[in-house]
Amino acid sequence: MKPAQSGWARSTSLLRAWTIVIPSLLCLGIESSYAGQPPILPEPLLKQGTLPPEEADGPFQYRSRRKKYFLVIAVNQTDVPKTDLPFAKVDGQRVLKALTGLGYQPMDPAHPMLTGQVATQTAIVASIKKARSRNEEATLLVYYTGHGAVGAKDLWLQTAGQEEVGEGQGVEVSDLIRLIRFTASQKGPEKAFEGELVLILDACYSGQGIVSQGLTLGELGKHTTILTSSSDIQESLSLNHPDLPKMSAFTHTLLQGMGPEWGMADDDGDGILRWEELAIYAEGQLRSLKKAGAITHAMEPWMVSNYRKGLLAYQRDQVRVWNSSYRAILTTDEANKILAAHLQQLEATPEDKLALPQEAQLLAQTLEPAPEDSYAQAVKATAEGRLENARALFAKAEAQSQERATHADAVIQRETEKQGQIYLASARMEMYAGRFTEAFGQYQRAATISPPTTPELLNELGVAGLRAGKYAEALPYLTEALRQREHTLTPSHPDVAISLNNLALLYQAQGEYAKAEPLHQRTLAIREKALGPDHPDVATSLNNLAGLYRAQGEYAKAEPLHQRALAIREKALGPDHPDVAMNLNNLAALYYSQGQYSKAEPLFQRSFWIAHNGLGPKHPTVKQVFANYQASLKGSGQPHSENDVWEKLSSSSYAPTSKTSSP
């Protein structure tokens, strides 16, 4: 999982670009996904009532294949007089069984449930630490049942062996969250858990401690949900009714909602059970239990969350409404996430127009926004390449949001945040339209509403500023993104390389080659270590470093780098991949710059035909390579009319056997 991402996300996908050094020629952008390649996403899942045989968190979450883990802590205290909770262990076992049935796996297979004398603070800490090694896209659910006590700020959870329950006794909820989210030093090989965290707390005073005493949403960490029983008395409320099991009333309602009463808990009937729906269901059931005399005091469960996309699970035979509004929200957010990911890194010249990622185009096919949802319609239009339509729809969405904000003070903050979301999505649309100055302006409008804090967000703004030629404005964003990544990640992490690469290209664009060179070299070293010497991303760094040397006229340094990059991509991607054409073009341009026309010509010819066959004869890249070859013929004193160039290309050994038309 990536931050409550608001569409911000990290990706190792690269923006492919062409580097041309022939005087007076423009640099090109090249598609990052090509015709004829298999789709990156699975087949759309929109056939009513049918599902593939894969495990999933929900109809939409099939795409992310998110893993789900749990830890059950049941402090029954049967060995401590006057503090025992006889049903806690049984409750924990029932929750364990229910979560297993919903596709969750034990975080610590050796200790799926900590109970009795085993549920010590040390054992809890040891099990929690295992969360840090989990995939960042995973969901971690921690269920606690036992005594709770209100502290100065939040709730203390009792652990095994305590004879008293009070502040300073056991584990504090905020410390539990910090333990999961952060390492002690933020350095070294250990890593914080960055996925979705859910805490279900069935303890006395839980709502009083979490909500009333001031544990803020920011302190919860990203992607966090806490669901509590929220009883306000020092008594564990168990069921007391002949027709009901002997267990906690709160846990009983949760298990009902997760299991036999799924349809009732799924409030909007879309087949997706969300945490907020489960909380609403539990509240209603507890009210009914109090009215029936099954519990002695009223209970009002609380839920606090900074992660509206959190899903519990789903059951295939109960999926009824596929095209729900919530599914549309998820799909829109995911499309924004994909679009943002392809704006994270630069290669070659920053002015190149970007290609829309194929993943976003495929996902847009599954998005069916409501007629009145101009924002979702605009995101769909962006992903499909209908950028003029998207621009008009974003303007309409902004006007609608501003209109709603005038109706009541209570919605001003919500609509202001919505406008920030609109500006971000609009900025990305303008990036793909090649209108970089307009895009950076929209990014800055978004930043005035919500200042960038994550390295992904800072990096995206910096890249936008660099593309727009706003070097002074871009520099603090890129340097802060690098600072954060160097502080929180290992020195050889690929994300550090992304920031180094972008900062190097900023200095290179300003002609500050002495500053750019060591950054390019660090980027190359990190990728070689982290990804291996033959990874395509290594070829990217080789090209960028070669471009730096070429700009300074150091051709002897640039040539072996271009040659190695070409060899890597031929091996990794195949000899006819358009990225190979890019490398051929760069090497040909290097030879041309040195007057080695006989070496440059066959490389230009091969580059042209790879691009022609892979992208189609009308593609702008094909036309530009044609112009590059034409300029090289002119520079070497050869006939160079369009007919002359086409005749040479058609008679070259790289031309296809079937007849083709001139671009």
Image: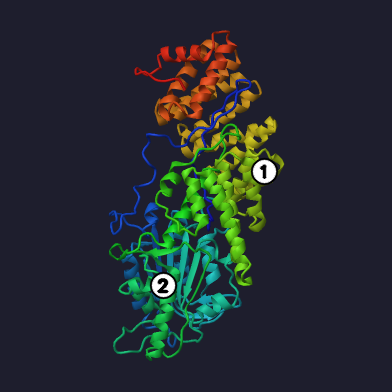
Q: Residues at badges 1 and 2 in contact (C-beta under 8 Å)?
A: no
The quarter of the picture where residue 512 lies is: top right
Residue type at the position of mark 2: Leu
- The residue beneath circle 2 is 278
- Disc assigned to residue 258: none
Instruction: Answer above or below: position of 85 versus 144.
Output: below
Secondary structure beneath dot 1 equals helix
Binning the other alpha carbons within 10 Å of mark 1 as few (below 14), some (14 to 19) or many (20 upward) gives many
Could you tell me residue 387's position as x and y percent?
53, 44
The quarter of the picture where residue 640 lies is: top right
Seen from the viewer's position, the closer of residues 127 and 524 is 524
- Residue furthest right in the image: 472
x 38%, y 46%: residue: 41
Instruction: Answer above or below: position of 473 versus 596.
Output: below
Residue type at the position of mark 1: Ala
x 59%, y 61%: residue: 401
Could you tell me residue 130's position as x and y percent?
44, 59
- The residue beneath circle 1 is 474
Q: Is residue 568 visible?
A: no
Seen from the viewer's position, the closer of residues 377 and 299 is 377
Could you tell me residue 162's position as x and y percent?
48, 80
Q: Is residue 306 visible?
A: yes
